[in-house]
Amino acid sequence: MPRIIHFTDSEMMQGKLIEVGQYPAVIFELDGPKPSSTGKSENIWAKFRISEGKYKGKELSVTFNSERTSSDLYQGIFWAPRVVLTEQIARAILGKSPQDLDLDDLLDKPLIISVKMTPKPDNTGIINVIDSYLPVGQKPLTQAVGAGMPPAPVQSDGVSENDIPF
């Protein structure tokens, strides 16, 4: 008798790198806030699922921490400052950045995640991480900040007229 196992779209995407780009997604799971192991901060664990296209079902995780000031990989986990939840994610989903945020308001609502590839801290490979969060319908970010702007005028001594000493 055959022993057939059916794998979900999500299971089929586990361990696969996806191309750098912007993808429609939802937050399908939020856990926390809970105290960190040291008790000095709080963590919130979020799981995102790409909802359309070639990578439909791919899941990405982010841990938001109340003490972090930048995003990076640590021990194989992608960490981000907790304030990203209101400054980027709530703004993308709700159109505002509330000071008192009900995490349930973020669940299963569409947004666009910008995904990039980054080396693992131990240099054993590359993984996908979420770089930013955008509202549905926003045009993709295809140019670097300042692209297409004329350069600042430069004086003969090499100092720009726009330079400010402090």
Image (spheres, rainbow, N blue to C red):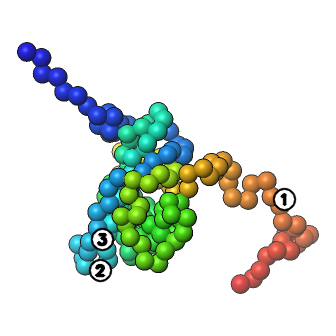
Residue 82 versus residue 163: which sits nearer the camera? 82
* Residue at the image point whose x is 48% and y is 35% from the top: 53
Circle 2 crowding by C-alpha within 10 Å: few under 14, some 14–19, many from 20: few
Q: In the figure, 127 relative to 37: above or below? A: above
Circle 3 crowding by C-alpha within 10 Å: few under 14, some 14–19, many from 20: some
* Residue at the image point whose x is 92% and y is 69% from the top: 156
Residue furthest to the bottom in view is 166
Quadrant location of the C terminus in the rendered image = bottom right
Relative image position of residue 18 (x, y in whole percent): 45, 39
The answer to the question of whether label 3 and label 2 lie on touching residues, with beta carbons closer than 8 A, is no
Considering only order in the chain, which callout, 3 or 1, is on the residue closer to the N terminus? 3
Q: Which mark is residue 40?
A: 2
Residue 50 versus residue 150: which sits nearer the camera? 50
Q: Which mark is residue 33?
A: 3
Relative image position of residue 66 (x, y in whole percent): 38, 74
Considering only order in the chain, which callout, 2 or 1, is on the residue closer to the N terminus? 2
The CA distance from mark 1 to mark 2 is: 46 Å
Q: Secondary structure at mark 1?
A: loop
* Residue at the image point whose x is 77% and y is 80% from the top: 164
Three-letter code, disc 3: Pro
Q: Secondary structure at mark 3?
A: strand
Q: In the figure, 43 relative to 51: above or below? A: below
Residue furthest to the top in view is 1
Q: Which mark is residue 150?
A: 1
Relative image position of residue 145 (x, y in whole percent): 69, 58
Q: Quadrant of residue 17?
A: top left
